[in-house]
Image (cartoon, helix red, strand yellow):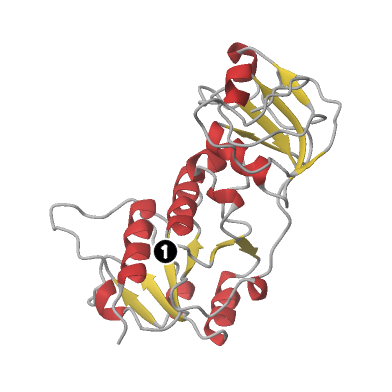
């Protein structure tokens, strides 16, 4: 990784050069030590989250605070004029959430552009849609994004009002998946489920009290996996907009699974189902 003002051929010794860190960069004037991003901006931290954002051509960047070791850990080349401010780890700690593992990298950037459901529904039976009903914990949503990206899901769909905002905490939990998996935020989740059905998807809600298992309920065609918040589960109106309700066959020794764990298992089941 080239530091600013240096020219080293071939990247770091013993590591193949990565693709260019080519997101859209722009300079900014902003004070330090606030612990919050500028108005309208998002502050990301940690190597995976920052590296993925830097490589995302659809992400506009404002400024990177970094240690030299942090920049050296990145896979790719920063443009020579990229706005970098070198800092010590203690300085970076004041820019992020308390005790957040910044790994020597803090990036301030603009939020990703809004996406629309019709733009991502491709009807591919191998690419499920994940619908989250009022799952508000950013760690859970980030972890679900990571699983969704790992199993090549089509998109994550959440309600706009009852979901966490784009943030450093969510991006760190997503480990780069925030830049990869389309995140569709809708005003009315029930209406979105209707649109998903019209696009040919079979909507399966996950509920631990359901009689059928997920394996029994999975169709051969496109599927939307619907998960509710921990404890509360899916709301009644969302259940009514599902074509089937299914459960994961877990041991009676455990009452339930964390929603991010349940999502990962459901995505694996969808990815490994046998064609009829």
The residue drawn where x is 55% and y is 31% is 46
Q: Position of residue 37 (x, y in %)?
A: 72, 32
Q: Is residue 160 left or right of residue 28?
A: left
**Who is closer to the viewer here, 171 or 65?**
65
Residue 209 position in % (x across, y down): 25, 69
Query: 4 above or below 247?
Result: above
The residue carrying pointer 1 sits among few (fewer than 14), some (14 to 19) or many (20 or more) residues within 10 Å by Cα, namely many
Vertical comparison of 152 with 210: above or below:
above
Q: Which residue is mark 1?
A: 227
The answer to which image quadrant residue 226 occupies is bottom left
Specify the quadrant that holds the N terminus: top right
Q: Quadrant of residue 208?
A: bottom left
Location of the C terminus by quadrant is: bottom left
Q: Secondary structure at mark 1?
A: strand
- Residue at 38% x, 64% y is 267
Residue 234 in picture, x, y percent from top left:
42, 66
- Pick whichever, 107 or 159, lies toward us: 107
């Amino acid at each position: 990784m080239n530091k600013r003002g240096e020219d080293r051929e071939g990247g770091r010794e013993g590591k193949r050069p990565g693709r260019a860190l080519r997101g859209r960069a722009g300079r900014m004037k902003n004070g330090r030590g606030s612990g919050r991003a500028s108005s309208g901006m998002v502050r990301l931290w940690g190597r995976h989250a920052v590296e993925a954002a830097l490589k995302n051509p659809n992400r506009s960047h404002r400024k990177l605070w970094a240690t030299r070791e942090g920049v050296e850990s990145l896979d790719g080349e920063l443009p020579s004029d990229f706005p970098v401010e070198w800092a010590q780890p203690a300085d970076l700690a004041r820019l992020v959430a308390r005790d957040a593992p910044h790994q020597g990298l803090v990036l301030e950037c603009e939020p990703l552009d809004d996406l629309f459901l019709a733009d991502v529904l491709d009807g591919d039976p191998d690419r499920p849609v994940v619908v989250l009903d009022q799952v508000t914990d950013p760690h859970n949503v980030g972890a679900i994004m990571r699983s969704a990206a790992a199993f090549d899901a089509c998109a994550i769909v959440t309600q706009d009002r009852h979901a966490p905002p784009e943030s450093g905490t969510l991006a760190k939990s997503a480990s780069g998946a925030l830049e990869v998996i389309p995140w569709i935020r809708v005003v009315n989740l029930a209406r979105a489920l209707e649109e998903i059905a019209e696009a040919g998807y079979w909507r399966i809600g996950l509920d631990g009290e359901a009689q059928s298992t997920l394996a029994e309920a999975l169709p051969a065609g496109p599927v939307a996996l619907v998960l509710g918040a921990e404890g509360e589960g899916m709301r009644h109106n969302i259940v009514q907009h599902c074509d089937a309700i299914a459960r994961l066959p877990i041991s009676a020794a455990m009452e339930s699974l964390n929603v991010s764990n349940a999502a990962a298992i459901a995505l694996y089941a969808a990815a490994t189902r046998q064609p009829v």
